[in-house]
Image: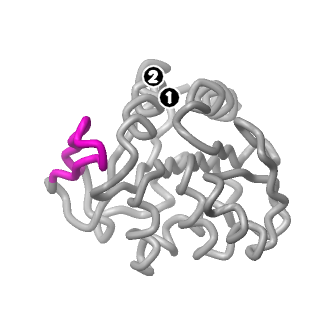
């Protein structure tokens, strides 16, 4: 069954952490909807390998309209968490136990949403202490799956495991 996946993203995202999972989701028949501050804006990855045209502005979407949330890494999550609209959007998915896929720095948005307490998760090495302060049960593994809902990974090298586990969660 096809799922509608919200992807919150802005400039300086980690290129492959968006392109590879988004392609895997689409290849499996799911729809990925990119969300930023304004529809039609073009955002560019930090390595300048990918440019994404935004499908919807944050004010034009409701989390209830999506089945899952995807948060690519890079500097994008840190920028997005400064905007309460994105924090509230992400918190909805965690509170409602909808699938959330966050890679590398992606968990930063979940830290700000105060949604990691008691959850097994991983992230890029430099944010793991922040995750610990957010009371997550932090592991140093290529992929962490918590309650068949939250899928996190550390870095681009973990993308195959991240995609595999995210797709398994989407099948449920």
Q: Is residue 120 magenta?
A: no
Q: In the image, what residue occupies the spot 79% across and 70% down? A: 117
**Which of these two is toward me, 163 or 60?**
163
Counting from the top left corner in percent of width and height, residue 118 is at 85, 65
Q: Position of residue 99 (x, y in %)?
A: 64, 47
Give left or right: position of 125 versus 69: right
Residue 22 point in image, percent of width and height: 42, 33
Q: Quadrant of the C terminus?
A: top right
Circles 1 and 2 in contact, beta carbons < 8 Å: yes
Residue toward you, 93 or 162:
162
Label drawn at residue 115: none
Left or right placement of residue 157 versus residue 40 in this view? right
Residue closest to the eye, 45 or 100: 45
As drawn, the residue found furthest toward the top would be: 27
What is the image's colouring?
one colour
* Residue 6 screen position, x and y as percent: 43, 49
Task: Identify the image quadrant of residue 94.
Answer: bottom right
Q: Does label 1 or label 2 sit earlier along the sequence?
A: 1
Residue 170 sits above or below residue 74 on the image: above
Q: Which residues, given as a range, are shown in magenta? A: 42-54
Query: Callout 2 environment at 10 Å: few (<14), some (14 to 19), or many (20+)?
Result: few
Q: Which residue is mark 2?
A: 29
Q: Residues within 10 Å of mark 1 (few under 14, many from 20)?
A: few
Q: CA distance from mark 1 to mark 2?
A: 6 Å
Which image quadrant for residue 145?
top right
* Secondary structure state at the residue bearing disc 1: loop
Residue name at image x 46 percent, y 43 percent: 5
The quarter of the picture where residue 111 lies is bottom right
SS at mark 2 in the image: loop
Residue, disc 1? 2
């Amino acid at each position: 069954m096809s799922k509608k996946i919200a992807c919150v993203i802005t400039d300086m995202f980690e290129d492959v952490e968006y392109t590879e999972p988004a392609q895997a989701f689409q290849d499996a028949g799911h729809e990925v909807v990119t969300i930023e501050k304004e529809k039609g804006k073009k955002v560019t990855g930090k390595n300048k390998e990918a440019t994404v045209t935004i499908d919807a502005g944050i004010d034009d979407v409701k989390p209830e309209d999506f089945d899952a949330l995807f948060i690519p890494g890079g500097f994008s999550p840190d920028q997005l968490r400064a905007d309460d609209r994105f924090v509230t959007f992400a918190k909805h998915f965690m509170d409602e136990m909808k699938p959330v896929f966050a890679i590398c720095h992606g968990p930063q948005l979940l830290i700000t949403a105060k949604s990691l307490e008691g959850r097994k998760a991983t992230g890029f090495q430099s944010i793991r202490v922040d995750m610990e302060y957010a009371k997550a049960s932090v592991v140093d593994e290529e992929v962490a799956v918590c309650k068949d809902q939250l899928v996190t990974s550390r870095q681009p090298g973990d993308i195959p495991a991240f995609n595999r586990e995210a797709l398994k969660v989407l099948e449920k």
